[in-house]
Every structure is written in structure tokens, then in C-alpha cells.
Amino acid sequence: METIQIQTESKQYPVYVGEGIRNELDSFLSKHFTNLTRILIITDESVANIHLEKLQVALKQWNPIIYTAPTGEKAKTFEVFYEALSTALENRLDRKSVILSFGGGAVGDLSGFVAASFMRGIPFIQVPTTILAHDSAVGGKVAINHPLGKNMIGAFYQPEAVFYDLEFLKTLPIQEIRSGFAEVIKHALISDSTFYDWLKMNIHDLNLLTAEQLSDSLVKGIKIKNEFVSQDEKEMGVRAYLNLGHTLGHAIEAEMGYGNFTHGEAVMIGTIFALKLSRDLLGLTFQLDEFVNWVKLLGYQTNIPKHLSFESLIDRMKQDKKSVGESIRFVLLEKIGQPTIQEISEIKLLNELKRL
């Protein structure tokens, strides 16, 4: 087991990483909460079918309540948010109750926002089941989607702890592995050239990731995220650098229809675009063709889906929560490990999108 302490302005909490770490939850709940009344597990259909029984065994003395959301981004709607709150009310959760988020990034976003909203805030714990959630489960950004924008309605609300049981990752389909690993690559690009070189040298087939490679990559990614979150909990400064690839990536997700294109695969296209902008605008010296060939080898799509309108993508980017006064802001790299933020004109964006 590895323990990483996340330090933010509002809270310090542990991230436990290891196989079978869910079995430590019972002890943590007993020690951390006095007079715990109820536990509500919020999960989704896919995770419930495969893993819920294992978590229930680990929590059998607490007899948790279960709310099951749709799988993927369909969990992050107003309707599902309302249903989850209704479940909490119907089962008489109170301020001594705890919500457990059991699933991927979408479930984590939903659960955290439910916890932040119910009775103006009750504790919640993240129990991630995807690689992607090594990023989303840490840092306290929780939200649901609106048809006009991803993650536009939400809060900054830190969990009490994160229990990252690597056993749950063994059943992930390759598409979800690929989606999550895009965030690992992003963390390396914005923070650590040595880590990036290690990834490029050692990871050639995501189907053949060893347990040690995966664990090392996830722990490193969480530590990098902590470096940014500890300095800037509410994304007023350096935390925005974690959005490398996300400006265009979120626009692609929205235009494709949430759930029809994975988050990480959209972010990878956005990352390639950001690297091209970095080369053209900031003089980034980087073997971009080598990078594109590497991620293609890992199975990533590297071009914007052909049926998407560039003008519609730009409109989406204007609505992104990182935009200010409709100025479109991109995280770019001056060099590996040295990110910066630039405003890009619509004309420049349109020309670059056509070139991509």
C-alpha cells in the first residue's frame, strides 16, 4: 500500500493506493467518524454489476444504501443528480452520514456534488474504479454537465479520503484504460520530463501494462496533481495547467454527445493540438511527430472526427469554464514541465483546426 497526503487550503486527506485497499475502509470509517448514522453508496450500472458485492462485503456491518446511476457521462445530468438527492432524503441521511463514490470519474463528479449540496455539505469518500479517476478523484472538483457545457454546474468540495483499490482496474476494457492513461501522459507533460521519457520508453501496448507499471504511473500522476492542487485549490492560478488538452477535448466530447467519445481520448486530440500551438506560438522544441506516432501505437485517435464543425467547436470552447469574457484560453507548453496559458484568437484557432 502507498499513502499520498493531499494538502489543500481547506483540507488535508489521504489517498491510499494498493490491491485490496477497500478492506481498510471499515477501519477508517470507525476511526474517522463518530456516531456515523448511514452510508450511501453512489455507483453506476456497470460497476454495480461487476464490483458492488465486493464493496458491500467490506462494509457489511454498515448495511449501506445503494443508489445506481447510469453508466458514464449519463450519470452527470440534472435528473440523475435529483434522483440521488431524493434517495438521500428518502433514507433520512443526515450530517452524520457519509456518501461513498464507487466508480469512475463521472460517478465521482456526481457523488461529490450530491455530497456538497445535501444539507449544505456532508462528508464523502472516493473509491475509484478506473484509471481516469486517478485524476478526477483527487482535488475536489465535482460537477454535473449542462447541454451547453461540461462540468459547468458544480463545486470545489474535497473528499475525506480516497481508497484506490487497484484490483478494480483489472476488469477495465481497453477503451477505458486508454481514456485514463491519457491523463497520466498529461501529468508527465506538464510537470516532469523524466517521467515522460520513462513512459515513452516503457509503455508500448496498453494491453500489456504490468501491475507495477500501472501502480507506479498512477502514484506518480497523483503526486503531480497534488503539486498543483496544494498551491491552488480553486483553480485561480497554476491549477489551470492541469487542463492541458481539455479546452478542445471538452468541446469534442460535447459535440460528439457526452458518452459517445471517451474523455481521455478527446483530451489526447486536444493535447496534440495544444502541442502544435505550443510549437508554432512559443517555439516549443519537441518531437511532435514522434509523440503522435507513439500515442497512435497506444491506440489513440489523433485527429478531430471528420463530421464535426470547426465553428461549432470554437463556440463550445467559448463556453468552456476556463474561458474569460469569451476569450479562448489554452494551456500550452514552453517546454516539457513548463506550462503556460495563452489566449488564442478565433481566426488563429480556425486556421489551426483546419491544419490539424
Image: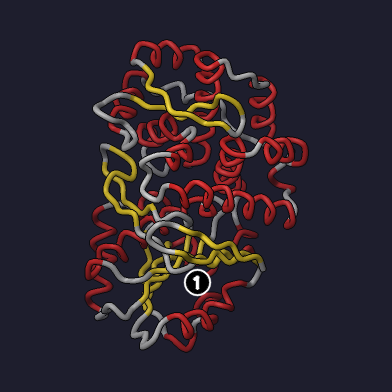
At label 1, counting other C-alpha atoms closer than 10 Å, the crowd grade (few under 14, some 14-19, many 20 or more) is: some
Residue at left offset 31%, top offset 71%: 122
Residue at left offset 67%, top offset 68%: 1
Residue at left offset 54%, top offset 54%: 134
Q: Is residue 182 above or below residue 315?
A: below
* Near-viewer residue (212 or 209): 212
Colour setup of the view: secondary structure
Residue 35 at what x, y percent from top left?
Answer: 36, 88
Residue 213 at what x, y percent from top left?
Answer: 73, 51
SS for dot 1: helix
- The residue at which mark 1 appears reads as 52
* Near-viewer residue (263 or 160): 160
The amino acid beneath tag 1 is: Leu
The answer, for residue 113, to whether it is visible in the render is yes
Residue 21 at what x, y percent from top left?
Answer: 61, 72
* Near-viewer residue (300 or 289): 289
Q: Is residue 43 left or right of residue 113?
A: right
Which residue extends farthest right? 201
Residue at left offset 36%, top offset 54%: 142
Residue 315 at what x, y percent from top left?
Answer: 29, 25
Q: Quadrant of residue 22?
A: bottom right
Q: Is residue 99 above or below residue 345?
A: below
The total of numbered circles placed on residues is 1
